[in-house]
Image (cartoon, helix red, strand yellow):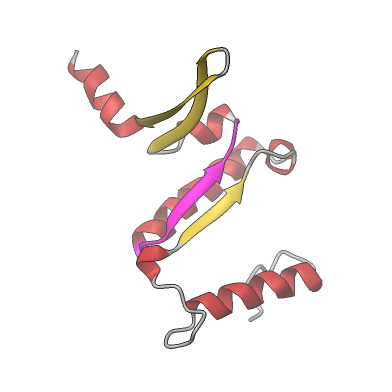
Amino acid sequence: MSAQLDSWNDGAAKRAIVGFVTRVTTPNTPACVPPADRIAVFDNDGTLWCEQPVIQLAHVLQRWEEMAKETDTRFLIITHHPLTMSRMSRLFGVTMSERGVSQLVSVNLDTAERLRDAS
């Protein structure tokens, strides 16, 4: 287990996260979540990522993209950071076009880029 979250100090939070991931990824157990139903969520709305060098964030996003292809894991990142948003293939959001009326928005960035390039 030493390779799991190896940059984190050992403590209750690390043990809880590693324990949870172990429980939900161990095949043939009651808590196992099938790979097709898994979504990894990263809340990028706080200050932690903003304090990290941009190149480190870009590397992490690239690695997550590689992991998603290797494992069929889907990643959900909660962010307002423009760099993070630019690295995604799809954005979801809520907008208020008029006071009191919220509307869900979804943009497939790959499709949007193809449409832009075709025009």
- Rendered image quadrant of residue 92: top left
Residue 83: x %, y % from top left: 54, 31
The quarter of the picture where residue 34 lies is bottom left
Asked whether residue 3 appears in the rendered view, the answer is no
* Residue in the image at 60% along x and 31% along y: 81
Image quadrant in which the C terminus is located: top left
Q: Is residue 102 above or below residue 70?
A: above
Magenta stretch contains residue 78: yes
Residue occupying image coordinates x 57% and y 12%: 99
Quarter holding residue 9:
bottom right
- Relative to 8, is 36 on the left or the right? left
The front one of 22 and 114 is 22
Residue 39 is situated, as x and y percent measured from the top left of the image, at 47, 58
Q: Which residues are magenta?
A: 70-80
> Residue 108, position in %: x, y?
33, 33
- The vertical placement of 38 against 91, above or below, is below
Q: Quadrant of the N terminus?
A: bottom right
Looking at the image, residue 86 sits to the left or right of residue 48; the answer is left
